């Protein structure tokens, strides 16, 4: 069974870059949610396109879960069963943070929905990257036009950040919190150190 590491964090946290770097370091399969399947690409367009407009909170959570169910069944689980390491940019923690805390749904209901979608598959380690609001804002401004989730407003994103912190505090054996500020290389070094400290073996494979 391969190792399964998930990167979580709010918009502009740098998690996608760090997920890619760890996958390269390990020679792992790099994947992401939502959207890293053909079905998922269609769901991602609905979920993130500003043209979608208002979307019922439960409908949003169900669409995320649908993407995750197909993603785990067709990409993540087959790779892990072949002994391939998998690094995933966003997973269950995102739904709990965004649709639970951010949108105001019951986080326990969202967690149960994701447990059903994944058939109970849990990562070995979840790396939560945290950055100050001003750094996240600078990175998002540089990235161009925001998607539907990025444009949800400051209060929404503060609730998301709190949701992540609560998840990490509730499961300290699985979650590690890493300072995402500084250079890409500095953050990558912190990530490697944090993962090794959780007994994942050397992060150079």
Image: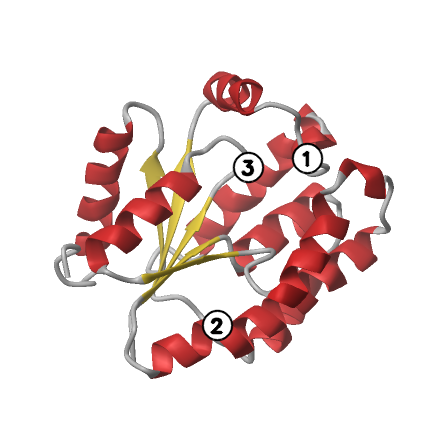
Mark found first going from the N terminus, 1 or 2 = 2
Camera-nearest residue between 74 and 165? 74
Q: Answer above or below: position of 5 versus 145.
A: below
SS for dot 2: helix
Residue farthest to the front, as pictured = 38
Q: Name the residue beneath numbered marker 2.
A: 75
Q: Are marks 1 and 2 in contact (CB under 8 Å)?
A: no
Mark in front: 2 vs 3: 2
Q: Name the residue beneath numbered marker 3.
A: 161
- Image location of residue 160, percent across then percent down: 61, 39
SS for dot 1: loop
Q: Name the residue beneath numbered marker 1.
A: 147
Asked if residue 111 can be seen in this view, the reply is no
Q: Are marks 3 and 1 in contact (CB under 8 Å)?
A: no
Q: Answer above or below: position of 190 versus 155.
A: below
At x 26% / y 44%, what residue is drawn? 191
At x 36% / y 76%, what residue is drawn? 80
* Picture quadrant of residue 63: bottom right
Mark in front: 3 vs 1: 1
At x 44% / y 70%, what residue is drawn? 122
Separation of residues labelled 2 and 3 (CA atoms) = 28 Å
């Amino acid at each position: 069974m391969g190792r399964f590491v998930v990167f979580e964090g709010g918009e502009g946290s740098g998690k996608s870059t760090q997920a890619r770097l760890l996958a390269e370091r390990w020679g792992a399969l790099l994947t992401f949610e939502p959207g890293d399947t053909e079905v998922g690409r269609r769901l991602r367009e609905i979920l993130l396109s500003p043209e979608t407009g208002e979307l019922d909170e439960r409908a949003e959570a169900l669409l995320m879960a649908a993407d995750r169910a197909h993603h785990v069944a067709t990409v993540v689980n087959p790779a892990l069963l072949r002994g391939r390491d998998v690094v995933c940019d966003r997973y269950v923690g995102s739904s709990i943070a965004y649709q639970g805390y951010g949108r105001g749904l019951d986080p326990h209901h969202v967690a149960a929905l994701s447990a059903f979608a994944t058939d109970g598959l849990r990562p070995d380690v979840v790396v939560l990257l945290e950055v100050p609001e001003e750094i996240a804002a600078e990175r998002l401004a540089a990235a161009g036009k925001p998607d539907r989730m990025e444009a949800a407003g400051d209060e929404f994103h503060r609730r998301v950040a709190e949701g992540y912190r609560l998840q990490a505090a509730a499961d300290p054996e699985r979650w590690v919190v890493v300072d995402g500020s500084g250079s890409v290389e500095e953050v990558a070094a912190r990530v490697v150190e944090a993962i090794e400290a959780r007994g994942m073996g050397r992060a150079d494979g």
